[in-house]
Amino acid sequence: MRPPALATRALALLLLVGGSIVFLIPFLASLSMALKSPGELATTSPWQAPIQPTTDNFRTVLTNENISFLTMFKNVLLIASLSTVGVVFSSSMVAYAFARMKFVARDKLFLLVLSTMMLPGVVTMIPTYVLYKELHWVNTFLPLTVPAFLGGGAFNIFLLRQFMMGIPRDLDEAAKIDGAGHWTVYWRVLLPLCGPALATVGLFTFIGAWRDFMGPLLYLNDPAKQTLELGLNTYNSMQTTSPWHLIMAASVLVTLPLMVIFFIGQRFFIKGIAMTGIK
C-alpha cells in the first residue's frame, strides 16, 4: 500500500476512534457514577473509575416502592415492539407501491409524502391530541402504536423505496410469469431481499419509540402506564436532594437495552444504509 493511502487510512481510523471515545464518555461517566457508593462518589471525581464497584444502586432503583421500573419496562417494550412491527409492515407496503406499481400521479404523491418531512411535529401536536381525545384514546397505548400501522413515516418509506429501486425488475417479471400478483411479489420476492433495509427501519423505529418522551407525556396519565423515559423524569423529581448515584443507575438501566440492541443489529444497520439506492 502506498504511503499516501496508508496515511489516509490511519487518519480515518484515528478520527473514528477519537469520535467513538467522545460519544462514549457520557455513558462511561454515568456507569462509573452508578457503580459508586454515595461516600465514594462524594470523595472522587465523576470521571474516575469506581474503586469498589457496587450494584446496590441498581437494586435500590429496581425495588423502589413509589415507582415500578419493571412495569415501565414492560410498557415501553410493548409500545416499541408494536410500533416497530407496524412501521416495518406499513412503510414497506407503501414503498413497494411507489417503487413497483404504476398509477396516476405516483411521483407527485411521492413528493407530497416527502414534503411532510419538512413539517415540524410541534405544528400537528395540538390537532393530533384533540383528535385522539375525541376518539377516547387518551391514557391508552393506542396513540403511540396505531399511527405506526398507517404508513410508517416519510423517511422510512423513502429509505425502503430507494432500496427496492435497486433490486432488478427481472425478479418481478419472472414471478408474474409464474402467475404471481403484486402481493406475492411484495411478500415472497422483495421483502426477503430487503432484509438489511427493513432491519435499519426497525432499529430506528424501536430506538425512537423507546426514547420517546413527549408522546407518553401527552397521552399517558396513569402512572401504571408510564414508560421508562417518564419514569426516569418522575424518579428524578421525587428526590428531595440530588442522589446522582441513583439517578445515574436509573439512566443506565434505561439506556443499556438500546445499546445491546444496537450492537446486535449494527451489521444489518450499516448494510442497509450502505446498499440503499445502489443499482
Image (cartoon, helix red, strand yellow):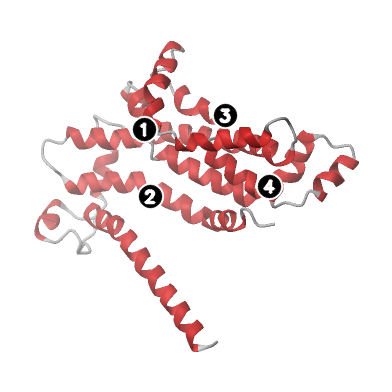
Quarter of the figure with the C terminus:
bottom right
Q: Amino acid at mark 1?
A: Thr
Res 103 quadrant in image: top right
Q: Residue 27 bears which disc, if any? A: none
The one nearer the camera, 236 or 67, is: 236
For the point 55% across and 49% down, the residue is 200
Q: Residue 256 bears which disc, if any? A: 2
Tell me which numbered mark, 2 or 1, is placed earlier along the sequence.
1
For the point 82% across and 34% down, the residue is 181
Mark 2 vs mark 4, foreground winner is 4
Q: Residue 227 bears which disc, if any? A: 1
Q: Residue beneath label 3, please?
A: 149
For the point 51% across and 54% down, the residue is 264
- Marks 2 and 4, how far apart at CA: 33 Å
How would you rate the neighbour count of disc 2 (Cα within 10 Å): few for under 14, some for 14-19, many for 20 or more?
few
Q: Residue beneath label 4, please?
A: 164
Mark 2 lies on a secondary structure that is helix
Q: Amino acid at mark 2?
A: Leu
For the point 44% across and 37% down, the residue is 209
Q: Amino acid at mark 4?
A: Met
The one nearer the camera, 62 or 152, is: 152
Q: Is residue 101 visible?
A: yes
- Asked if marks 2 and 1 touch (Cβ < 8 Å), the reply is no
Give residue 217's position: percent from left, percent from top.
Answer: 33, 28
Tell me which numbered mark, 2 or 4, is placed earlier along the sequence.
4
- Marks 3 and 2, how far apart at CA: 27 Å
